[in-house]
Image (spheres, rainbow, N blue to C red):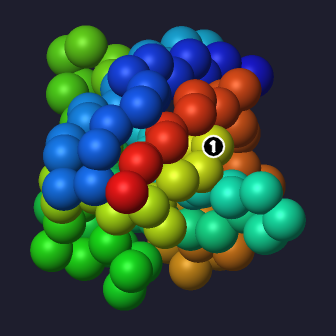
Amino acid sequence: QVQLVESGGGLVQAGGSLRLSCAASGRTFSSLIMGWFRQAPGNEREFVSVISGSTVDTHYADSVKGRFTISRDNAKNTVYLQMNSLKPEDTAVYYCAAADWWISIQTFQRGVGNYWGQGTQVTVSS
């Protein structure tokens, strides 16, 4: 079983930045696909970003491309989401997600078979 603990959420003004962190345990970290999803009130959970275990492969939702950057530190068992130029529509609970290496990126993006963190609230005021 994989345990995920997020941190770094909070309240920020539009145009500001936040960095989310997610510490993982329970598996060899470098073997995990890691990523982020978010869920706004009244909406379904949606894919935000994913990074492969080797860090060479990253993907982003169109809504965050050019503003968010995902990275990971395999020595620290941690994945990060740097969020810049935040907008009120980025307000949501952000969830860290992980999947075993044999899961395809496409399957991960659908949220199928992922391990999940408890979520951290990000609120962007206008």
Residue 49: quadrant of the picture: bottom left
Tell me the residue at 56%/68% (across/down).
Answer: 47
Which of 98 and 29 lies nearest the eye of the viewer? 98
For label 1, the SS is strand
Residue 111 locus on image (x, y percent)? 71, 63
Number of other residues with Cα within 10 Å of mark 1, as a class: few under 14, some 14 to 19, many 20 or more:
some
Residue plotted at (65% across, 18% down): 3
6 or 34, which lies in front?
A: 6
Q: Is residue 86 above or below residue 32?
A: below
Residue denoted by label 1: 93
Would you place residue 58 above or below residue 26 in this image? below
Q: Is residue 14 above or below residue 117?
A: below
On the rendered image, what quadrant is the C terminus found in? bottom left
Q: Residue furthest front?
A: 126
Q: Is residue 71 visible?
A: no
Give the percent coordinates (x, y) of residue 109.
59, 71
Residue 11 in sight here: yes
